[in-house]
Image (cartoon, rainbow, N blue to C red):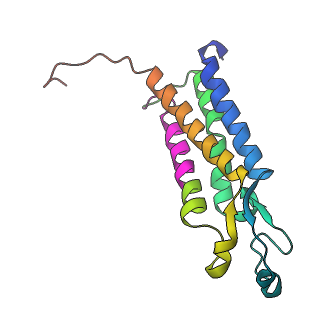
Amino acid sequence: MDFSRLDRNRTLLGGTAAILFLVSIFLLPWFSIHVTPQQTRQDAWICGTGDSSCTGFDTFPILRWFLLAGALSPLILAWIIIRGHKLSWPPGEMTMVVGFTMMVLIGYNGIIDKPGSGVTENFVSLDYGYWIAFVSSIAIAATGFLRSQAGQRRERKAPGTV
């Protein structure tokens, strides 16, 4: 195990993004609900009875597991680099793909298809934890992209040669 293979800036970016992402999933509110008397009478609570904010872990029962697995991708990338595993693709490429996938899933489930249905969807607003998770997923993708570009020192072959 050779820790000197890790670039300090990329490691800090990826590690900080993963930690912020995990904190935002478990602890920070992603969605806030503007409570009205109509909702109180109809029991139209999205986050649970009496709760006016939801975390990402509470809101999405299936997506939460994909997001947790995606948050581990910078750690897996660091493990691959430290151990010097030989891959058939540039190290960091899968971390980049996972980060972009997380970004698209978070963007879709927060901006395009908010939790709730019908009238209750109009009262749901995005909270600061959602934006921290969104930016953290972009930072995870950027970490993978920067790492995949670091090892691109291939010689060009002449056209028509194999």
Instruction: Give yes or no for residue 102 being in the magenta stretch.
Output: yes
Q: Main secondary structure of the magenta part?
A: helix
Residue 61 makes an appearance in the image: no
Instruction: Point out the image quarter for the C terminus.
Output: top left
Front-most of residues 162 and 134: 134
Q: How many numbered marks appear? A: 0
Q: Quadrant of residue 2?
A: top right
Q: Residue furthest left?
A: 160
Can the viewer see residue 100 in this picture?
yes
Question: What span is in magenta?
Answer: 89-104
The residue located at (68%, 49%) in the rendering is 68
Image coords of residue 127 (percent x, y): 71, 55
Q: Is residue 127 above or below residue 1?
A: below
15 sits to left or right of 77:
right
Is 114 covered by the magenta stretch? no
Residue name at image x 56 percent, y 55 percent: 107
